[in-house]
Image (spheres, rainbow, N blue to C red):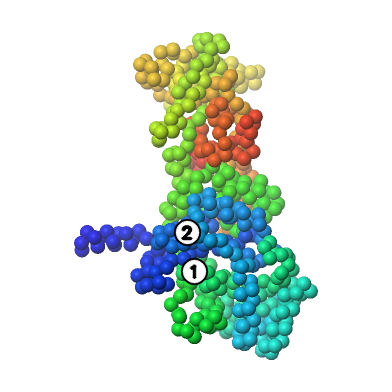
Amino acid sequence: MSVKEENANEEKKSLSFVEQLVEEDLAAGKNGGRIQTRFPPEPNGYLHIGHAKAICMDFGVAEKYNGVCNLRFDDTNPSKENTEYVDNILSDISWLGFKWGNIYYASDYFQQLWDFAVWMIKQGNAYVDEQTSEQIAQQKGTPTTPGVASPYRDRPVEESLELFEKMNTPEAVEGSMVLRAKLDMANPNMHFRDPIMYRIIQTPHHRTGTTWHCYPMYDFAHGQSDYFEGVTHSICTLEFVPHRPLYDKFVDFLKEYDGTAAKGLNDFRPRQIEFNRLNLTYTVMSKRKLHTLVDEHLVNGWDDPRMPTLCGMRRRGYSPESIREFINSIGYTKFDALNDVALLEAAVRDDLNRRSCRVSAVLDPVKLVITNYPEGASEEMEAVNNPENEADGTHAITFSKNLWIERADFMEDAPKKFFRLSPGKEVRLKNAYIIKCTGCTKDAEGNVTEIQAEYDPESKSGMPGANRKVKGTLHWVSADHCVKAEVREYDRLFYVENPSADERDFHELLNPDSLHVYTNCYVENYAAGKKPGDYLQFQRIGYFMADLDSTAAHPVFNKTVGLKDTWAKLNK
């Protein structure tokens, strides 16, 4: 085998199975070598990390093969949809770094779909059923037993046409009638047992107002919208595998309706390809459950940093690049799996290490007084913004006699391997001097209220004498040159690994300790000026971002992720 052939084989192995199918279609000359995908969210909620996987595939395939990916809102259920969700979906896709070719709506095709449905009735392939939803469900049968035909299945065409028109009037009663396709009540695929095409909904539509009172079902509108738009590859998740034959059947009817089949123009047909959806441990992806969390105020809105929504992750401090890298790392298969949320956090951690600005913050402060440092004096220390990227430069942090350090960084009676501050021991203060602890002050309850130390004037970072080795390095902020801040630290929203598979009420599975708020924190002045969207590393603590609630007078920071994955160890 030649080197060229070996390289080609290796490249093919690196492709997802979806990309391999796309390349096969291109090699076969299908669709004239044209690639067109679409991302079709229903605007009935905010996008979550699961949607991001579909976005990366839909837009990624189009980008890789010089095609186009359009955005289409499947807005066929006005009772659950509104413009708030539309606007947020647009924002999230842009934040992830993708650009759509065109924006479409299923509602753009309401008249075409209606006319197609009328043709279906006239051809004897659809009828109006006046049974209740419960009766229809009972007559569907099971996968191993055939269904029972509706008593309205053979009603005259003219009668169904008349009733279908009545369904689209303000007087029509929701649930009183539906339009069903006349297919096969004995088909082992339950979706073929006379599926519902239209139902009555008397809620005004966010785009069409009260023009329509009767709306198409997803299975009827989706494939037809793909066909109208010229979609070549309809890429979706595995739950749509059993829907695929119905998708193709309706396209067959549509090709007959528009004359394409009669002309022998059969080369164009959207090809549905299914991949596994994204499931994460300690997370739910159900829109119904996410709605419940928001509506019952169990979280602080759709963008609560504990939520798996993209806007929640953005507010928490995740970067779009880290989400895309995580999705790329887990890949696409035909088998559902439960992915460890630690893999996502590791991708976030790796990405933020490259892009975050290092700053100093103390979350649980105790006073440190440098007793031999001049009273009222201060000096500027140079702090590197990002050791991973020299171009990010430096900033100044002020050093003075009175400092704040982390309470956990001092121990009066320390064990041998405690390399932080304790009486008689030396540590280096990051970007500053080596100090030696000389003692501490306690209150009546024995709590340490102040630590005393002396500094070595010849040990300033960057000075010739600064090379003296000590085992510990602590971060700090000047008590006279800092800003008090609030810090929000997050844990898993659910305390069970797979809440979606747990049969208990999901309310019982919520982690009562998923949010900790620290109100007595201090950050250096430089950090206090940071805004939402600025990626930060609080040195020795973790990655953080200013929250939307943050102000100059009262900075608020969200903890994005720790420097290391300590959660797994704590919960073994």
Q: In whole angstroms, how far apart are the C-alphas of marks 1 and 2?
A: 13 Å
Q: Secondary structure at mark 2?
A: helix
Q: Position of residue 369 (x, y in %)?
A: 55, 15
Mark before the other along the chain sequence, 1 or 2: 2
Q: In the image, what residue occupies the spot 65% across and 18% down?
A: 444
The one of 74 and 67 positioned closer to us in this rendering: 67
362 or 366: which is nearer to us?
Answer: 362
Would you place residue 131 above or below residue 82 in this image?
A: below
Disc 2 residue type?
Phe
Amino acid tagged 1: Val
Q: Are marks 1 and 2 in contact (CB under 8 Å)?
A: no
Q: Is residue 175 visible to us here?
A: no
Measuring from the top left, give residue 184's x and y in whole percent: 58, 84
The residue to which callout 2 is attached is 59
Q: Is residue 395 visible?
A: yes
Residue marked by disc 1: 231
Indicate the secondary structure of the residue bearing disc 1. loop
x, y (%) of residue 388? 40, 35
Q: Residues within 10 Å of mark 1 (few under 14, many from 20)?
A: many
